[in-house]
Amino acid sequence: LSGYLHLGMLLWQSPQEYGGPWNFGPGPSGGITVKEVVERLTRLWGGGRWEEAADAESEREASTLTLCCDKANHTLGWRCLLPVEESLALTVEWYKKFYSGHADMYEVCCRQIREFSEKARTAGLPWAL
């Protein structure tokens, strides 16, 4: 989201220069399988189960799909800030608080945005300065 927000600001200032397709995502070493995502989310949630729906008759998808984010890295100075595990932990935290029914979700969102923005400033990312 940080990449798209930064791109939106730049598009407003200079649409000719920043128009076109863009990808934002983890670097080549940051990708994990859907199975790994589900297993990590289940562990972070503290329970749950899942079943792989294997269908021998169905067409198989590519085993690895990745985004090339070179354009965003080089042109915008953007890079993925949070490791997958931290991103998943923040997501689980948000949903647990939401489903508890006792949290001020506006405050939860604002706190997570503040913490993320501070990490970006500390990392020297151009959109956070």
Image: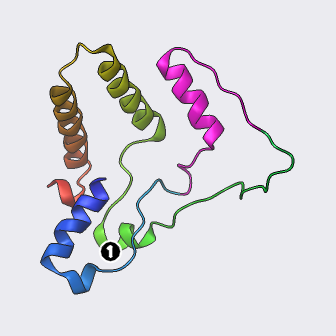
What is the three-letter code of the residue carrying label 1?
Answer: Thr
Residue located 35% across and 80% down the image: 20
Q: Would residue 66 appear left or right of 80 to someone viewing this image?
A: right
Density class for disc 1 (Cα within 10 Å; few <14, some 14-19, many ≥20) is few
The span shown in magenta is: 28-53
Res. 105 image quadrant:
top left
Give me the residue at 53% from left, 49% from top.
Answer: 30
What x and y, as percent, mark residue 98?
A: 30, 23
29 part of magenta stretch: yes
Quarter assignment of residue 83:
top left
60 relative to 75, above or below: above
Up-down: is 25 above or below 43? below
Q: Residue furthest right?
A: 56
Q: Identify which residue, 19 or 102, lies in the foreground.
A: 102
- The residue that mark 1 highlights is 75
In this rendering, position of residue 66 left or right of residue 129: right
Residue sitting farthest toward the front? 57
Quadrant of the image for the C terminus?
bottom left
Measured from the top left, where is residue 67 in percent x and y? 52, 63
Query: Does residue 54 lie above or below 65 as drawn?
Result: above
Specify the quadrant of the image occupied by residue 48.
top right
Q: Position of residue 33 (x, y in %)?
A: 63, 44
Magenta highlight on residue 43: yes
